[in-house]
Amino acid sequence: MSEPDHYFTAQPASPDERRVLRVHLAGRQVEVETAGGIFSPDHVDLGTRVLLDHVPAPPADGDLLDLGCGWGPIALTLALESPAATVWAVDVNERALDLTRRNAERLGVTNLRAVRPDEVPTDVRFAAVWSNPPIRVGKEALHEMLRAWLGRRAPGGEAHLVVSKNLGADSLQRWIALELGVDVERTASAKGFRVLAVRDR
């Protein structure tokens, strides 16, 4: 995929050819809509599957965040499992946000807001953050993103991140702990991925 059509691009250059997938989310088989020009358009990617298989149940209420939502597998899971919560699905890719909104409607989800980063009110604090963060955006941009969003956890709120071991999960774990002054525990390791839990000390 050429750089102009990378999934970090706000407006992908590739044709918006929609497709329907059957996937397993929140303990059920569902149909979702995807398209090219977004992250993992043909399936639930392995890192996201590892995350969803190894996180504790999300808080029943409060504000929950999926950072880098793509077509929505993490955000939809949060919304289906915690219908009394408000789920923020955040991405810079407008096609991904549109797909997440359409998938929420398709699944009858009414507690999900798919928005650009600057559309989340600055006073919102998150009871949980679940993310398969965009490691390939580059270290500087990734660190800026994690500083901003992990710092917006509510008191006692936990973040769960999935990162490929080969893309620097262990060094990122050390950086988060040192930079943000938080506890970072590796809670799972599967299929080449680490799941990192971020908590206040």
Image (cartoon, rainbow, N blue to C red):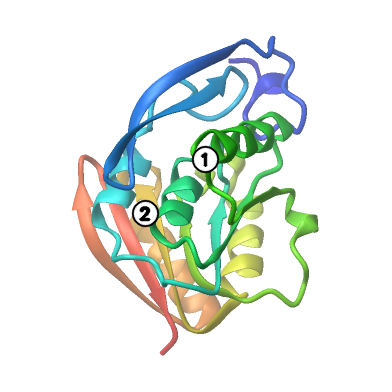
- Residue at 49% of width from left, 73% of height from top? 61
In the picture provided, is 97 more to the left or to the right than 33? right
- Residue at 67% of width from left, 38% of height from top? 97
Q: Quadrant of residue 121?
A: bottom right
Q: Quadrant of residue 73?
A: top left
Query: Mark 2 and mark 1: span between their CA atoms?
Result: 23 Å
Residue pointed to by mark 2: 169
Residue 72 disc label: 1
Local crowd size for mark 2, using a 10 Å CA cut-off: few (<14), some (14–19), many (≥20)? many
Residue 148 disc label: none
Say which quadrant the C terminus sits in: bottom left
Percent position of residue 196, x then y: 34, 63
**70 and 148: which is toward the camera:** 70
Task: Give the structural element (helix, strand or loop) at label 1.
Answer: loop
- As drawn, which residue projects farthest toward the front? 108
Percent position of residue 171, x then y: 39, 60
- Residue at 73% of width from left, 34% of height from top? 94
Instruction: Tell me: residue 38, above or below residue 79.
Output: above
Say which quadrant the N terminus sits in: top right
Instruction: Tell me: residue 165, above or below residue 180.
Output: above
Q: Amino acid at mark 2?
A: Ala
